[in-house]
Image (spheres, rainbow, N blue to C red):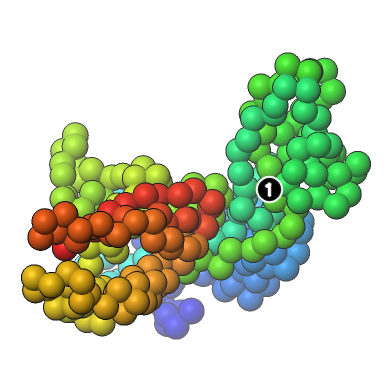
Amino acid sequence: MGLPTNIITKVTKIIRYDIGQYLNDFVSFIDKDRTKILDYYSGSITRPNRVAFRNLKKLFTQAYEVNALMELNRDRMTGPEYWEVLSLLTQIEEGLNTIENSSKWLRSIITKNNFSPDIEVQTVLKQFQTLEQLARELGSSSSESDWIRIALRNDIAEEDYNSEGGNVIETSYFNRLNFNIESVVDNINGEKIYGLDLDRSLTFADDDLLALSYKETVVQAVNILAQLTKGKTPEFPEDGIQVDLVGGSNRMSVPYPVIFRQFYATFKKDDTLKSLLVKNIEIEQDALKISFEVETRFGEVVPTQIVF
């Protein structure tokens, strides 16, 4: 992999580990197995290639062993030629981690023992509701057979539920609506569609920055977008509301259609959000209040208000 044979031989003798074989195994994996893993998580194939995943696990074991031995013998490897080896080993480890997390980079959905290209939802079985009725509510046109998919997904036997309901069910809509989310890197499943973010005030909690929950993240995102004004974000100076349109004392002359278009254009850039609905416009003394609701791609509604 771009290293002279004599350097590989020297390092092998020092750490007493055949790194040449390790490098060859990595190249072979990239050539033969990497695509199979990506195809699985992208939905091109429905069954994982066990050999490819087994080889990935083997490479992680090799990487751990090589790194431990390199650290143990670091005092014996101080020349520039060894730095090149360390740099290559670091790149390989980063590549393995990227492949290991490829399901998140591809925004795929992982379920128990299978891949599903749909957003999963959690629901509670109602009183006297059957799995077949639930499948029909979720958009199934073949509920008499699709209920089996729900049962298998949740490992539910017939005796595990009755007319009282109350079972917590993990399932997905049957209408195959796919979500192409680009602003979040994760397994897009349920509330994970919102992603995770730090609190905008950079608050510390337990000696670390406070991280929000998924729901808190989307609420914060909506509030930030609602309060955004043009020129406030250097990278995107055109995003937000043009404040001089709502300035001045004559609130009756405010060009509301222009403001609404700017709102829609701003919120449209966040692909975790689905729609924006203006609910109320109110003038109190010198304040202009606009209340609206934002629907997320997960179907939840986030109410917010902006005051000028």
Q: What element does badge 1 sit on? A: strand
Q: Is residue 27 left or right of residue 216?
A: right
- Residue 20 in the figure: left or right of residue 176: left
Q: Position of residue 102 (x, y in %)?
A: 54, 62
- Measuring from the top left, give residue 41's x and y in whole percent: 64, 61
Counting other residues with Cα less than 10 Å from the Cα at mark 1, is it few (<14), some (14-19), or many (20 or more)? many
Q: Compare residues 76 and 61 and report the one nearer the observer.
A: 61
Please report the residue visible at 61 percent of the width from the left and 44 percent of the height from the top: 121
Residue 242 position by quadrant: bottom left
Q: On the image, which quarter does residue 45 sit in?
A: bottom right
Q: Is residue 64 visible?
A: no
Whether residue 163 appears in this view of the structure is: yes
* Amino acid beneath label 1: Ser
The foreground one among 176 and 141 is: 141
Instruction: Tell me: residue 16, above or below residue 20.
Output: above
> Does residue 37 appear to the left or right of 95 in the view shown?
right
* The quarter of the displayed image where residue 222 is located: bottom left
Q: Position of residue 119 (x, y in %)?
A: 61, 53
* Mark 1, residue position: 172
At x 16%, y 50%, the residue is: 202
Front residue of 161 and 16: 161
- Quarter holding the C terminus is bottom left
Residue drawn at point x = 64 percent, y = 30 percent: 124
The x and y percentages for residue 71 are: 30, 54
| Number of marks present in the image shown | 1
* Residue located at (48% from left, 79% from top): 1
